[in-house]
Amino acid sequence: MSGNTCFILRFALGATVLFGLSGSVLPEAARAQEAASDSLRNYEMEAVVVTATRSPSVLRDVPVPTRVIPAEQIQARAALRLSDLLAEEPGMVLSHFLGTGIQLQGLDPAYTLILIDGEPVIGRNGGTLDLDRFTITDIASIEVVQGPSSSLYGSEALAGVINIRTRQPQEPFRALVGVRRQTHGTENLTASLEGMMGRYAWRLNADRLQSDGYDLHPEAPGLTGPGYETETYSSRFDVSLISGLSARINARFATEEQRNVRGFQQEGYAFTFEENEQRSDLSLSPSLIWQAGIGNTWTLRNHLSDYRTESLLSGGIDGREPEYSTFDQGIRKLELQNDQILGTWLLLNTGAGIQREIVEAGRIAGVSRSNRTSWLFSQQQFILSSTIDLTTSFRIDHHSDYGWQLSPKAGFMLKSRETVRFRASVGTGFKAPTFQQLYMDYTNPVAGYSVIGSADASALLSELESSGQIRSVMTDLAAFETVVPESSVSYNLSADTDWGPAVHLHVSGFRNHVRDLIETLPIAIKTNGMQVFSYVNLRRIVTQGLNAEISWRPSASSRLALGYQFLDTRDLDVIEGIDNGEYFGRQNGRDFRLGRSDYGGLFGRSRHTASLQFSADIPHSSADIHIRGALKSRYGFGDQNGNLILDTDQEYVDGHTLWNVTLNQPLSGFAQLQIGLVNALDHINANQIPSLSGRQVFAALTLNTR
């Protein structure tokens, strides 16, 4: 039975179950379910967001920088995965290391918390949560909060929060099916059903994506981008139990299978390995919402999530036993939140919760590790006058390994006129070390390098030395310490103004002071020439920059948006070392002392990035066109001269631009055709950016009963 047939049968089975549930309910008038579940919903006058304040707030009145990508833009751009969509947004830069992650305000993907309907997503690899895992077929909007949000969300929100809000059922019945074909044998099938009946509302989505992969190095074994098959199923079920009390269950299940061949040469012999990897992602999020009175809502949330990967590596040297490894991560979370409107001047949000995290993996010393976190948070939104709003918040976390952590934040907004908003905020963020950073014990069977956690670095390195695997040690192990939690203080300023009904301007600046940022560094060289890596804290890191965005609607059927970000990053200890003459470069065979102007900041960060979005209806037709461009200036790729800092031209990746084009053509009242180009100018950098496979062409057909 083909993969597509299995996919269709599984979706049909799920739809049958939901039809059975909804058919057992006595018919009633269409409900206003969502209004009952949110105490502030009745105050909605325009776009409403929940991520920045953990309760519904009008977007233009949120005191911290918040971006919303609505469903209309998501559908019009025809992005294939979440990563494709975010890559086109100003101030958001993709990072391709152990998956596709996102940088916010110059901080790595490990520092951005990813949520689905307000609940955390797990399954990071080296700190990166791979955004290619997420389909966009059931997304209603995406909310992006830039700047530390630990005062509301705790660890991992040091750089910001991205909340994927899935679509809520709104019609008595709706069905959608779609198919997409793309270069590299890529095929995407989607299906969606939703309905409302009496007190019940339900939605079921299914998505299947497969690709043959691509090869930028035909002379080497295997594919640069391996082939894969992914399936994602998600559902939402809402029910009004009694007056003022409702329940909701969100569920998601995703699987991926990936195949590839890898190889290397050693002592003149070529070795190849077959690698098969499977991963699964399951989450269940039931909640109860009780509207205790006007402006008083209680929400009890439970979130259960499990992520698992299985890898099988076979081949290589004759007689070698296949290597099988697993990684299992699970969280169990319970949280209670109360939202109150106290008069006309104060909105109060308070909550408390507890979470247990468990990891089992052969790559972690001890195989199984767990921790527990409990927290209390409170937010106060003061409406001081018709022109001044003040928002304060704090969160107290207790981690079983690191004790107490206090995260306060304050935001201020001045509305000088109806069309002008000034915002200022200062806040703190923190991030606890991961199990891998503490207890990793892994040697790559193909490349031969090793990674060891900081908690056991001295002992594990001594074991490697005693077995004759270490040629030289690059650091003083006596001074090596277990990494401690990272923390930051962040300042954000912004101004928004409307120039008439057609032009909107946004300007903002940010500065993040990060202490004890955890970095991966080599600590020894093995006898096979490969390195041993571990984790250390960098004491003082600064990221700062400016953002500017302008959008213009020359007509009701066209829109142009331009965005630009200037980013400056630096390690203040490196700056101090340069001033003290401790860092050297090499030119024409001679060493020389580096100056501040030679230092390029942190690796992997472009100093200049820009974006363009243009959309317009095509005259004398029902079609519309969308053109998006993204520019990245050069950025550091890796140290080449052994001083462990970015300082020579050979350590940079050249800047580049990427352009995507989509044409939408309605075929009837229920059918739409989309055709387009991805990476239209065919930019390729096979050695330094293997994630760019070149120009791709796609065509998609969607049928919708609405």
Image (cartoon, rainbow, N blue to C red):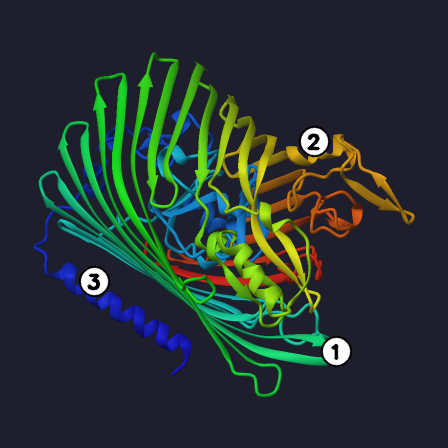
Along the viewing direction, whichever of 248 and 667 lies nearer the viewer: 248
Residues 595 and 80: in front is 595
Viewer-side residue, 489 vs 462 = 462
Dots 3 and 2: beta carbons under 8 Å?
no
Q: Where is residue 263 in the image (x, y as percent from the top left)?
A: 65, 75
- Assess disc 1: are there few (<14), some (14-19) or many (≥20) residues with their C-alpha within 10 Å of its C-alpha: few
Instruction: Mark 2: give few (<14), some (14-19) or many (20+) Cα within 10 Å.
Output: few
Which residue in the structure is indicated by mark 2? 576
- In this view, the residue in front, 220 or 508, is 220
Q: Is residue 361 above or below residue 150?
A: below
The label nearer to you, 3 versus 1, is 1
Residue with the mark numbered 3: 18
Q: Is mark 1 on a helix, strand or loop?
A: loop
Task: State whether residue 232 appears in this view.
Answer: no
Whether residue 500 is situated above or below residue 257 in the rendered picture: above
Residue type at tag 1: Glu
